[in-house]
Image (cartoon, helix red, strand yellow):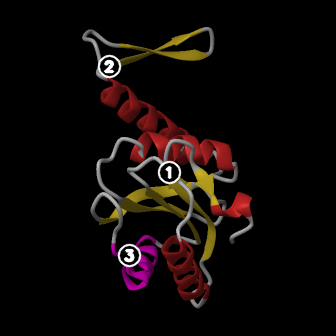
């Protein structure tokens, strides 16, 4: 895929047709690059769009962490836990270890619901609370937890964080 500039807009040209999955992967890469180049991750809509590109087509549950610097710019997107079609085991200790390793100041938690129903479960709420409490001990903020389904849901927008 080549990138060209056309009247201050970037245009992407391919020599071969792309599958829907390849288009979504490329969209996620483009969004990640814009976040890494200075755009702050403080708009839930753009975060949902990015995470939908990353997680929507997964066939099993995946728990991921967006690691952010002090200005809420993306350091790294990291898929941390993989589960089955209806759940994944998530360990706060592993989240803390990753946060410390990458020197993150804040995080956005994310996971998908392969069923398409993004409504937060009791287990989703409990693990978010546990991770939030654990990270608070080391002065790292959890800005949001996004569940990706047919329509992504933000814990922050629901007042759950």
CB atoms of marks 2 and 3 within 8 Å? no
Q: Nearer the viewer, mark 2 or mark 1?
A: 1
Task: Name the mark on residue 117.
Answer: 1
Front residue of 111/15: it is 111
Front residue of 68/127: it is 127
- For label 2, the SS is loop
Q: In the rendered structure, which disc, 2 or 3, sits on the residue that comes first in sequence?
A: 2
Q: Which residues are magenta?
A: 89-102
Quarter of the view holding residue 34: top right
Percent x, y for residue 32? 48, 43
**Image check: 161 left or right of 124?**
right
Distance from the alpha carbon under mark 3 to that under mark 1 = 19 Å
Q: Which residue is rendered at x = 42% and y = 37% of the image?
A: 29
Quarter of the view holding residue 14: top left
- Mark 2 lies on residue: 1
The quadrant of the image that shows the C terminus is bottom right
Q: Nearer the viewer, mark 2 or mark 3?
A: 3
Distance from the alpha carbon under mark 2 to that under mark 1 = 34 Å
Distance from the alpha carbon under mark 2 to that under mark 3 = 36 Å
Up-down relation of residue 33 to residue 122 (above or below): above
Query: Mark 1 packing: few (<14 Cα in 10 Å), some, or many (20+)?
Result: some
- Mark 3 lies on residue: 90
- For label 1, the SS is loop
């Amino acid at each position: 895929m080549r990138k060209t500039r056309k009247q201050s807009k970037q245009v992407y040209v391919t020599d071969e047709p792309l599958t829907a999955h390849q288009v979504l992967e490329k969209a996620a890469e483009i969004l990640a690059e814009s976040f890494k180049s200075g755009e702050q991750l403080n708009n839930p809509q753009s975060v949902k769009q990015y995470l939908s590109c990353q997680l929507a087509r997964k066939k099993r549950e995946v728990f991921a962490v967006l690691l952010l610097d002090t200005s809420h710019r993306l350091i790294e997107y990291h898929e941390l836990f993989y589960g089955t079609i209806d759940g994944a085991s998530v360990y706060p200790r592993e989240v803390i270890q990753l946060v410390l390793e990458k020197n993150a100041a804040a995080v956005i938690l994310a996971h998908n619901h392969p069923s398409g129903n993004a409504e937060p479960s009791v287990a989703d709420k409990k693990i978010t609370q546990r991770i939030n409490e654990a990270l608070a001990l080391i002065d790292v903020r959890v800005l949001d937890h996004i569940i990706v389904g047919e329509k992504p849901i933000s814990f922050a927008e629901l007042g759950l964080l």
